[in-house]
Image (spheres, helix red, strand yellow):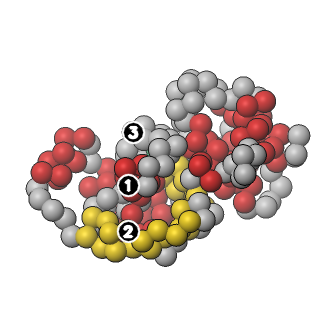
Amino acid sequence: MTGITRRSFLGRSSAGIAATATLPALTAGPQEKAAAQQSGPAPRTRIELTVNGESHALEVEDRWTLVEVLRDHLELTGTRVGCDRGECGACTVLLDGKNIYACSYLAVWADGKAVETVEGLARNGVLDPLQQAFIEHDAPQCGFCTSGQLMSAKALLNEGAEVTEQSVREALVGNICRCSNFLNYQAAVLAASRGA
Ligand code: FES
Ligand code: FES
């Protein structure tokens, strides 16, 4: 894994960097977040975004993260929350085609943008080739990290560049698998990229 670090992954995600660098509240722990919730109503903003091709107009509290809106308000619970502080990748979604940590991105920042979640991968009951490859390579174990792995892999394929073992490792380096099934995930992405 020469040259691959989580730091370099985060460096590619300018949105994630901006979120963690400019908004310390997003990296607050559960106690700080609970205290913030008790401090009273926050300003609200009306936003419009598309999620999996469907338009939504919502009024959100300015402090809500994108993953909160997806899971708690749009009931798209396929996007997981592991660390809730930009470390595990379980919350990965696509924003205008690029992968971001939805726990570290404010919902108001998604105004006017297109969000894709794992629920949008299958079309008309047919699994996305990545999903099919994940199954065939026995990639998901407990499955907690799987939707995040899928969306990071999708972002890689969206780039349209040649996919190599190295580029797959780089694409998935921000997605931690506590079941340590990294090699199966990587093999699955490589296979999907080759139509195997
Ligand atoms: S839940 Fe977002 S990075 Fe872990
Ligand atoms: S399959 Fe269990 S965390 Fe990845």
Q: Residue at x 52, y 32 (%)?
A: 144
Q: List the residue tagged with mark 1.
A: 73
**Quadrant position of residue 159:** bottom right
Q: Residue 185: x, y in percent? A: 69, 34
Q: List the residue tagged with mark 3.
A: 83
| Residue 92 visible at all | yes
- Mark 3 residue element: loop
Residue type highlighted by circle 1 = His
Q: Please report whichever mark, 3 or 2, sits nearer to the chain's N-terminal start.
A: 2
Residue type highlighted by circle 2 = Leu
**Quadrant position of residue 53:** bottom right
Q: Residue 8: x, y in percent? A: 57, 52
**Mark 3 or 2, closer to the camera:** 2
Q: Which mark is residue 92?
A: none
Q: Is mark 3 within 8 Å of ligand 1?
A: yes
Q: List the residue tagged with mark 2.
A: 58
Q: Please report whichever mark, 1 or 2, sits nearer to the chain's N-terminal start.
A: 2
Q: Residue at x 25, y 41 (%)?
A: 30
**Mark 1 or 3, closer to the camera:** 1
Quarter placement of the C terminus: top right
* Mark 3 vs mark 2, CA separation in Å: 26 Å
Is residue 85 rendered to the left or right of residue 44? right
Is residue 34 rendered to the left or right of residue 102? left
Is residue 79 rendered to the left or right of residue 66? right
Q: Please report whichever mark, 1 or 3, sits nearer to the chain's N-terminal start.
A: 1
